[in-house]
Amino acid sequence: MGVPVFSPSPGTYATAQSVTLSTSTPGASIRYTTDGSIPGEAVGTVYAGPIAVASSVTIRAVAYLPGWTTSSVSSGTYAITGSVVAPVFSPSPGTYATAQSVTLSTSTPGATIRYTTDGSTPSETVGTMYAGAIAVASSVTIRAVAYLSGWTTSSVSNGGYAITEPKVNVTVGSREVVYDWTNDRCEDLDVPDGPARFVRAGDGTLVLFSGNAPRYYVSRGSDFSSLQRVCGQPALVSADNRTPESYENWEWLWAVYREGDKWHAFVHNEFHDATSATCRVGDSSPSNPCWYNSVTYAVSSDSGRTFTKPNAPAHVVAPAPNAWVPPLFYPSSYVAEGYFQPSSIVRGPDGYYYSLMLSIRDKSSGQGICAIRSDRLDDPTSWRAWDGSGFNLRLTSPYATGASATVCTYLPIAIGNESLSYNTYLGLYMLVGYSNMGPSTTCGFYFSLSPDMVHWGPKQMIAPARIPWCDAGPATPGVLEPVMVMYPSLIDHGDTGVNFDRTGRNVYLYYTRDNDDNLDRDLVRVPVTFTVE
């Protein structure tokens, strides 16, 4: 029996090799090993084609044929001692108008890449191990190396990305009261407790959603100047169930999107534990500091006059990832967890529906923002959250599965998520929200831009404002109001669509003005003009 022969011959090489095995005995089979074990007729891998050798290895092989004596073992040691090819960037380093998703690769099989973004030099032990696309939302230099055991580490690749996202000048006009609590309310709790949303009904009239739980009223009018509160029938009355797994507790219509005669809604749902001794016993309202959030679904078939929740509790879109457990002690401030306050719903140019929602993993965590996407609005289970690589994560209820659910991957966004639109003037998604807290932050309302709903650019100011947790102060130049404000949203009065999910250059900023730090809240709007520098 002819012993296996190696080609190319065993030895030292500067690059990866493709090794073939052969025997002079017709019809014989070959088995080989690379782990140091001895091959035999039943041991090792059956040779079926060239063996890729990217790093140093010893190949042992035997040839065999039924009725013949198995060959002796042939051994071939290959030392691969070349240099790893330096990482390549895609897209190429350069100047871009929007955030980018940068991938790194090397043509050396089996090599690992590490990179830095802080100016330090990466190595086999320094830097972040590359595992997927790098989100680049602001100007940065990425430095990367590739390495492989037994090889010389590659040279450092440098990729400078300048994100020159459109610098937009913002002009803000005079205030106009849209809803005056003193004169327009249906009852004392009828306050604008959420971002303003508009939907155009089939007869062309406008419906304004900006209400409160437990009885949520809307306003209607033939145009933006004739809106009147409809007090005869709330559009949604909170179920006020006292169990977290019902997902029907205190309920706000938070985002509405009309398709034909169906008005689909995201409901912001709050469960406040009214039975546990460490919560406010007997009080299921938002005054109770024990706060368990979820986003659910409701639908209207009567032009937004009344909404129902089909198949509850299966109407839940984004249930809190953990089952509710009361705190050990009565909290000194609110203890919250779950998903809540979804943005407006936007249909992107790709045909998918998008929204952003706030998330608090558990009572001890800070909040983040999740992106969700669906191709249909009538199925609450169709929404998928961003998991870091795609919209793949289904948000499941711990009461249905018996286990805690995986939480979405938070987006690197520097503002809140109150209002989402696709801005046709800039050709980008536009998010409007509060500023974050911090010593270098000017308190107010900001916007951020994105090409894909995942990679968001730096925040740009609309106007300074006094926010309960970030007070610009009444003397700040250009401050929107001398009192506290909340819930910013952008509405383009010139949008001819049904759902006002498109904004342009000339829009209106709507917000809630808190006149007395209690119930006296008005809905106010100011005209805003964007101009690209």
Image: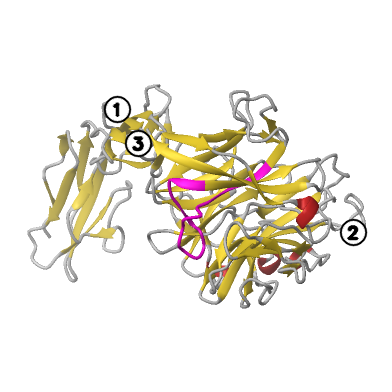
Q: Amino acid at mark 2?
A: Thr
Identify which amino acid the numbered label 1 is placed on.
Answer: Asn
Q: In the image shown, does 462 or 494 lie closer to the viewer?
A: 494
Residue 247 included in the magenta stretch of the image: no
Q: Which residue is mark 1?
A: 158
Q: Nearer the viewer, residue 184 or 319?
A: 184
The CA distance from mark 2 to mark 3 is 54 Å
- Residue 286: percent from the left, percent from the top? 81, 52
Left or right: where does residue 473 sit relative to residue 277? left
Task: Provide residue 48's location: percent of width, then percent of height.
Answer: 19, 61
| Crowding at mark 3 (Cα within 10 Å: few <14, some 14-19, many 20+) | many
At mark 2, the secondary structure is: loop
Mark 2 lies on residue: 275
Q: Is residue 96 above or below residue 350?
A: above
The magenta span reads 486-507
Residue count near mark 2 (Cα–Cα under 10 Å), binned few <14, some 14–19, many ≥20 = some
- Of pointers 3 and 1, the one earlier in the residue sequence: 3
Q: On screen, 164 above or below 519?
A: above
In the image, residue 349 lies at what x, y percent? 38, 59
**Pointer 1 local density, CA inside 10 Å: few below 14, some 14–19, many at least 20:** many
SS assignment at label 3: strand
Name the quadrant of the N terminus: bottom left
